[in-house]
């Protein structure tokens, strides 16, 4: 297992393998902005890193006691999320949908350094790209496992924290919160939206984005006839996540969750289409679709393990997975939806 030691951790709520957050030994004085936060942060000791992970069925998972997150966090999964970051950047022409709104939220202030928080940061690619683009902005990436680099640029902090619990940032102290592909990490998305609204300053920007977990076809064709295995696969995934981890679909409800909190305005939703496979007429979309299909195969295999670990019949699960993968290579017009919502806090 190749895991680099982490840059830093925080805060004062117990060790992840005991179901709390990190409270690693050895403090430092690196906290950039204690006035903006509720707690001190302490450096993760390299010797403690293995305790953030646990091995099952040949894959490495987080050892956190209460996060519902079901996917592995090992090298194969890290490659997958890195690859998806690159695919999305190419598909969207950047790492967010609307540069104007990001620039507006990060307009320099004479009173303080602008601050961005990325929830469920993973390997931290989004954070690192943001830090490069906005060198005068402080970017915090938060996760329950230390899988980001231990050598981030000066304007980046990677932190260990459970995003289902109160964040360490003070009320109205953050300019942008970004949360991408965290739906399976979050016990209650409406609760997360409220916590995001608490830490965002009035006018601060929430960027939320999630992959749809359902079968879909271009031109709104009905997937039930064309890709029956994909439909059954996602149905089984949804049932298993709900039964075994209490997780409900989030992607196509993002806008509703954010609007119904009553704490955001200028709520804007975009649904981006990602082709699966090489069927698209446009050569650049063909290339994207080819790479996306590879990444989806890794995801589907991890979901297969999740369903078997949750007690589903292994033979039935393998049949679904094999059928879905075969459809990816034979059915023209398969797509995935990527939902993005941007909204300004109106606390
Ligand atoms: C699918 S990955 C997405 C990573 C990153 N946002 C991206 O888009 O590349 C989900 C991440 O959420 C993290 N995660 C799971 N449960 C969490 C929790 N309770 N608090 C913080 N992060 C969590 C996982 O460790 C994983 O790195």
Image: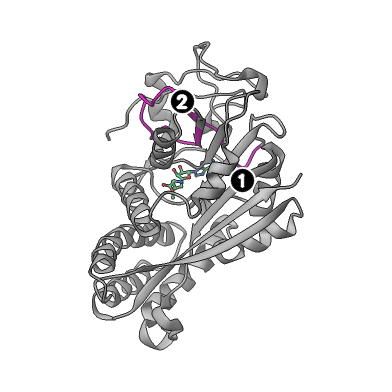
Check the picture and name the quadrant holding the N terminus: top left
Q: Residues within 10 Å of mark 2 (few under 14, many from 20)?
A: some
Task: Mark yes or no: residue 185 visible.
Answer: no
| Residue 164 located left or right of residue 69 | right
Q: Is residue 237 magenta?
A: no
Task: Report x, y in % for residue 326.
Answer: 26, 75
The residue positioned 38% from the left and 26% from the top of the image is 152
Regarding mark 1 in the picture, which secondary structure is present there?
A: strand
Q: Residue at x 77, y 55 (%)?
A: 262
Side of 264 relative to 223 (left or right): right
Front one among 25 and 111: 111
Quadrant placement of the C terminus: top right
Ligand 1 neighbours mark 2 (CB distance < 8 Å): no
Q: Residues within 10 Å of mark 1 (few under 14, many from 20)?
A: many
- Location of residue 330 with respect to 208 vertically, above or below: below
Question: Residue 136: in sight, yes or no?
Answer: yes
> Which mark identifies residue 244?
none
Please name the predominant secondary structure of the magenta segment in the image.
loop
- In the image, 56 versus 22, the foreground residue is 22
Q: Position of residue 248 (x, y in %)?
A: 59, 62
Looking at the rendering, the stretch of residues picked out in magenta corresponds to: 140-165
65 lies above or below 5:
below
Q: Is residue 180 above or below residue 123?
A: below
Q: In x, y percent, where is residue 346? A: 74, 47
Residue to which mark 2 is pinned: 155
151 within the magenta span:
yes
Q: Which disc, if any, is residue 205?
A: 1
Sequence-first disc among 2 and 1:
2
């Amino acid at each position: 297992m190749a895991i680099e030691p982490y840059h830093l951790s925080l805060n004062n709520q117990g060790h992840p393998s005991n179901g709390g957050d990190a409270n690693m030994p050895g403090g430092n004085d690196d906290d950039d902005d204690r006035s903006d936060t509720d707690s001190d942060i302490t450096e993760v000791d390299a010797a403690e890193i293995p305790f953030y992970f646990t091995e099952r069925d040949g894959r490495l998972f987080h050892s956190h006691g209460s996060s519902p997150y079901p996917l592995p966090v090992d090298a194969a999964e890290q490659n997958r999320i890195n690859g998806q970051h690159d695919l999305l950047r190419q598909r969207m022409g950047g790492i967010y949908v609307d540069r104007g709104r990001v620039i507006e939220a990060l307009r320099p202030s004479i009173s303080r350094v602008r601050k961005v928080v990325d929830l469920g940061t993973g390997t931290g690619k989004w954070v690192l790209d943001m830090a490069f683009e906005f060198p005068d902005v402080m970017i915090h990436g938060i996760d329950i496992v230390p899988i980001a680099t231990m050598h981030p640029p000066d304007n980046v902090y990677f932190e260990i924290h459970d995003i289902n619990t109160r964040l360490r940032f003070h009320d109205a102290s953050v300019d942008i919160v970004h949360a991408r592909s965290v739906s399976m990490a979050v016990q209650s998305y409406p609760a997360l939206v409220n916590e995001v609204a608490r830490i965002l300053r009035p006018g601060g920007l929430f960027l939320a984005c999630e992959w749809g977990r359902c079968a879909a076809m271009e031109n709104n064709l009905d997937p039930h006839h064309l890709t029956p295995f994909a439909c059954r696969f996602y149905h089984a995934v949804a049932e298993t996540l709900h039964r075994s981890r209490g997780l409900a679909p989030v992607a196509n409800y993002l806008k509703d969750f954010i609007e119904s909190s009553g704490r955001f305005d200028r709520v804007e939703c975009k649904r981006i289409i990602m082709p699966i496979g090489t069927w698209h007429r446009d050569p650049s979309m063909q290339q994207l679709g080819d790479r996306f299909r590879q990444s989806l195969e890794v995801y589907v295999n991890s979901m297969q393990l999740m369903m078997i670990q949750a007690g589903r019949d292994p033979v039935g699960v393998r049949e679904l997975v094999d059928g879905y993968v075969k459809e990816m290579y034979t059915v023209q017009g398969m797509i995935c939806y990527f939902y993005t919502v941007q909204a300004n806090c109106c606390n």
